[in-house]
Amino acid sequence: MTELAQDAEHMRTAIRTAWQARHRSAPNPWVGALLVQTDGQTFAGSTDAYGGAHAEVVALRQAPQPQGATLYTTLEPCDHTGRTGPCTEAIIRTGVARLVLALQDPDPQVSGAGINRLRQAGVEVLVGIGAPEVQHQLRPYLHHRLSGLPYVVLKLASTLDGRSAATDATSQWITGRPARVDAHKLRAYSSAIVVGARTVRVDDPALTVRLWPEENSSINCAEVTDPWRVVLGSAPKNAKAQPCLSWTAEVTELLHHLGERGAIQVLVEGGASVAHTFHQAGLVDQYVLYLAAALMGGDDGTPLFRGVGAKTITEIWRGQLENVQRLGDDLRIDVVKSSR
């Protein structure tokens, strides 16, 4: 196997390892690292919960002989002191000879400084291996660091005939448990969750991550936290969503507010009027539709969006189909803004 092929294989391991930190690392990025010693032994690590060690340090701490090793990491090591010390210092101090990384970190505090520091210290640095995969994996983080705004995911659940609630306003539960567990994982991956005041009054949702992870999961439940809860309008004092942020200004201002607080991803759960507001304003980065094998059987149920839509077929919004996944008897369909 060539060195380039070996680098690609080891980077794939680092990418898989990074997913272990997806639910716990924010507002830091979820990074994976793999240290390969000169004797061939490998040690993997991912970012600890916020305030803990970064992935590179987690991997280095496990290795008994890091001198001369190659370190693979999905994102550029930091060279500044925050809640932890610079990862570059740990890499240099332990004698790592070579660093292979996928992406330069666009965060202004990093942005090439880590690469430069390591090269100045004599560490060989190779950039770009696995870049497309990591760009996809870190898409919410990269979006936040480049725009200052959180990555917005609009979650929708519908029958096959496009209805999100019955005429009596009931909507629980359109989908089965596997889809609902997956939706709770979306919550765990998000810094904040946004719903409308009407949804709070009618459904009284708790907006917690109570279904994920399921039993026998390798995920440490103590690391899973509920997202910040945001209600557009006023929530009753005894609502299950309390404590929450009641927001009455424009939703664009809300995104700026959440972005400044370090929210990397925001999950919009509805209802139909809220979904329409974010969609019509062009604020949605990713649509996640859970489609149930069910039919409302009429045109009087609640549609996915409540409000004025496209007036002609040439004006309809078109995105890029990214994923279709079966979850029990339901489908999860992911659509993102088209890059074409």
Image (cartoon, rainbow, N blue to C red):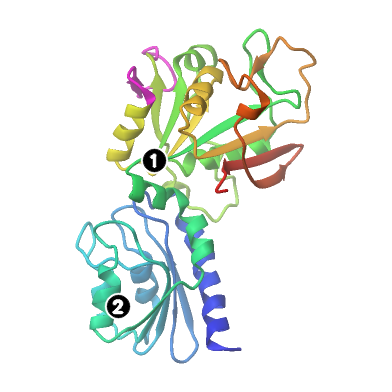
1 versus 258 height, above or below = below
Q: Residue 47, located in which quarter of the rendered image?
A: bottom left
Q: Quadrant of the N terminus?
A: bottom right
Q: Mark 2 points at which residue?
A: 91
Q: What residue lies at 51% left-to-right and 53% top-to-bottom?
A: 219
Q: Can residue 48 be seen in this view?
A: yes
Horizontal relation, residue 337 to residue 141: left or right: right
Q: Name the residue under label 1.
A: 150
274 versus 262 height, above or below = above
Q: What residue lies at 67% left-to-right and 26% top-to-bottom?
A: 313
Q: Is residue 114 magenta?
A: no
Horizontal relation, residue 220 to residue 160: left or right: left
Horizontal relation, residue 240 to residue 181: left or right: left
Mark 1 or mark 2, whichever is nearer to me:
1
Q: Residue furthest left?
A: 81
Q: Tag 2: residue type? A: Ile
**Residue 126 or residue 310, whichever sits in front:** 310
Q: What residue lies at 21% left-to-right and 58% top-to-bottom?
A: 82
The location of residue 221, given as percent across then percent down, is 47, 47
The local crowd at label 2, few if under 14, some if 14 to 19, many if 20 or more residues have their Cα within 10 Å, is many
The location of residue 300, given as percent across then percent down, is 71, 9
Q: Tag 1: residue type? A: Pro
Q: How many marks?
A: 2
The location of residue 177, given as percent across then percent down, is 67, 35
Segment tinted magenta in the rendering:
235-251
The location of residue 305, given as percent across then percent down, is 59, 20
